[in-house]
Amino acid sequence: MGDIDQYYQILEIQPGASLEEVKQAYRDLVFVWHPDRFAHNDRLQQKAQQRLTEINQAYQQLLLFLSQPELKAIEPQFGPPTPPAPVRENLNRKSFKKPAGRSGSQKSQNYRKATSKSQKGFKTPNCETFLGKRSNFKTPNRTNPTPKRKRQFSTQYSKPRNFPRETRQSQKYSSFPWWPLAIALASYALTGWILTKSAAPLWMWISICGADGLWAAILIAEGSATPRVWLTALALAGAVGGAITGFQAGGAVTGGVWAMIGAGLGAIASSEAESRAVASVFAITGVATVTGLIAGTGSGDWVRTLVGAICWGMLGLICGLIAELAVDSDSHKGLIGLIGLGIGAWLGSGSGASSGALVQALAIAGSKTVYGAWAAIGIIAGVVAKMVAAERAIGPGKQFYTSILLLATSGFGLWLGYWLGDRI
């Protein structure tokens, strides 16, 4: 019965608890350890999934144990042996005890005739069998009775036929990820259609396929959808999407700048970055966006834009630090200063480029910027959907096949978008 006690410990209740107490404990633990509560942290979500698997197994086994009367009677059946009832002595008519048989008699050693029906099943301590070959009665092993029953329990009842509703809900992640794959297919089809309609150069198609191949190789090497794989996937998706959008908006220079911006934003989105890191990237991306757009379209002086962003950014940083000292906050030191840096850098880049240069740059970019932005959105959405599918479909020894499936999904989606772009 050690397994049953362990199942009670997993559900954090005392052995011998009732069926209602087991169900209530199970509901409480499922609520506490459900993986959806840790969607912001991959490490905690994986730990919660493992914990929930143990809870489900313990709950299923306890339900079976409590619903089978013969299982509940296992331990009392093999309790300490009770002392045998006293045997009535065989007396003669004058109430004298009859003498025992001769020592050489086989009958007197192995068998004593019972004087009543209640004694016919009694076994003497010194004999091996009482009823001879006519009986199938076997003496239970009182020294170690539990292993045999454990084996019966684990083999006969380890696979329950009916699962409760809560268990089916908690095991929804074991099903095939149809919806993530459908979303990935639609996202890549949208990207292929936009690239076809905008007459995108060949290097954009090659960049998307190359990023998918590199991500699949890292997934195979890691063996599972680890945080490192998420970091690589979103960084690559941001870099490719930024390069496409920037090239459509202002040429090669803007494409290169926005590729670095996209990679940085993808890395921030897929990691547990602190608020100070987010504020720093916010300031840098604002300056790089405006400077790259001005430099790529040639609508203004990008050097003046960069210098103005730096000067105004330093002023904003000083004002933010002064505000932080005035507030005297012990938490998130430097955060207000970095927020001031970001606001100042954005204002400085806008004033350095002037509103006329920004309007001219957007006019030069035209509708191609919108096409590029939608293509980037499609790439990022497709990568996220594939990562979700990888988390739910990948398993031990299935890394290669899962990667092939995801590559085939993205490749078919791009081809479908190209086919639709030619005919619509």
Image (cartoon, helix red, strand yellow):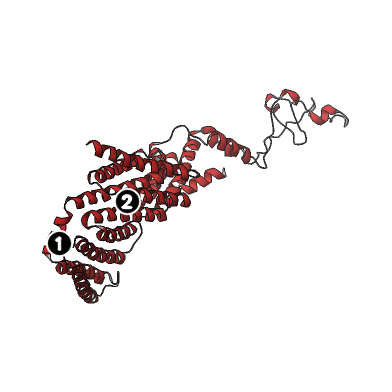
Q: Quadrant of the N terminus?
A: top right
Q: Is residue 152 above or below residue 381?
A: above
Q: Position of residue 202 (x, y in %)?
A: 31, 48
The disc at residue 358 is 1
Kind of residue at badge 1: Leu
Q: Is residue 48 above or below residue 258?
A: above
Residue 62 in sight here: yes
Q: Position of residue 118 (x, y in %)?
A: 67, 27
Task: Determine the CA span between mark 1 and mark 2.
Answer: 28 Å
Residue bearing the label numbered 2: 203
Q: Position of residue 142 (x, y in %)?
A: 67, 40
Along the line of sight, the residue nearer the viewer: 207 or 345: 207
Judged left or right of residue 61, residue 255 is: left
Q: Image quadrant of residue 296?
A: bottom left
Q: Secondary structure at mark 2?
A: helix
Judged from this view, the residue extending furthest toward the left is: 356
Q: Which is closer to the viewer, label 1 or label 2?
A: 2
Q: Image quadrant of residue 332?
A: bottom left
Kind of residue at badge 2: Trp
Q: Residues within 10 Å of mark 2 (few under 14, many from 20)?
A: few
